[in-house]
Image (spheres, grey):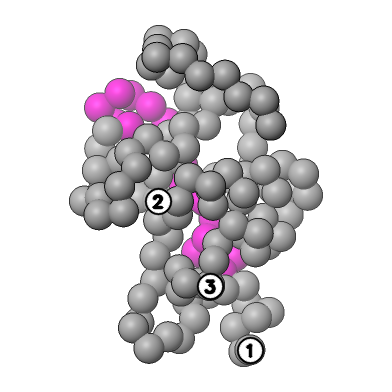
């Protein structure tokens, strides 16, 4: 993938109505990828992020938000720690989005990007 970097903020580069800030705390489910939108991944990179911090930041910037459809396509897998997290690393989100863009299949995309360590699996693998 080709990538350009710049010290400028995405807020200065794109119209606000074109930006979608991805956050696991959004009430809005990402149902499809719109090629005319700009998706912000990893707006805050920190595993110990306070709950709803990314959502608050997006709202402060008057940005539309969305979350990946993990709850809609995956189930919580039983595990010893009872651990379930929808917070993904940037590379995992990128893998999900790029696989979805290629396949137009959320199950395939989530299989590609959501590791079993997050505590979620696709229903067809829940019994395994």
Left or right: 24 with respect to 57?
A: right
**Residue, far right:** 103
Q: Position of residue 27 (x, y in %)?
A: 40, 48
Q: Secondary structure at mark 3?
A: helix
Q: Secondary structure at mark 1?
A: loop
Badge 3 vs badge 1, beta-carbon distance below 8 Å: no
Badge 1 vs badge 2, beta-carbon distance below 8 Å: no
Marked residue nearer the N-terminal end (3 or 1): 3
Q: For residue 70, which numbered disc appears in the image? A: none
Distance Cα–Cα, label 1 vs label 2: 26 Å
| Disc 1: which residue | 128
Instruction: Please identify the quarter of the rendering in which residue 125 is found.
Output: bottom right
Left or right: 42 with respect to 54?
A: right
| Disc 2: which residue | 24
Q: Secondary structure at mark 2?
A: loop
Q: Position of residue 48 (x, y in %)?
A: 25, 54
Q: Is residue 33 above or below residue 5?
A: below
Q: Is residue 35 magenta?
A: no
Left or right: 119 with respect to 72?
A: left
Q: Is residue 30 above or below residue 83?
A: above
Q: Position of residue 15 (x, y in %)?
A: 47, 13
| First to last magenta residue range | 58-74
Left or right: 5 with respect to 125?
A: left
| Disc 3: which residue | 116
Marked residue nearer the N-terminal end (1 or 2): 2
Residue displayed at 62% across by 72% down: 122
Question: Callout 3: 10 Å neighbours few (<14), some, many (20+)?
Answer: few
Residue displayed at 65% across by 64% down: 111
Which of the two residues, 45 or 70, is positioned nearer the viewer here? 45
Foreground label between 1 and 2:
1
- Is residue 124 something one can see in this rendering? yes
């Amino acid at each position: 993938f080709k990538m350009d970097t710049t010290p400028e903020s995405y807020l200065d580069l794109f119209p606000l109505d074109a930006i979608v800030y991805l956050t696991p705390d959004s009430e809005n489910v990402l149902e499809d990828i719109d090629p005319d939108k700009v998706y912000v991944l990893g707006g805050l990179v920190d595993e110990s992020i306070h709950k709803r911090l990314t959502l608050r930041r997006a709202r402060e910037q008057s940005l539309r938000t969305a979350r990946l459809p993990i709850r809609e396509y995956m189930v919580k897998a039983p595990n010893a720690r009872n651990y379930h997290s929808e917070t993904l690393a940037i590379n995992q989100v990128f893998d999900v989005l790029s696989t979805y863009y290629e396949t137009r299949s959320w199950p395939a995309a989530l299989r590609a990007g959501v590791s079993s360590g997050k505590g979620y699996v696709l229903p067809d693998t829940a019994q395994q």
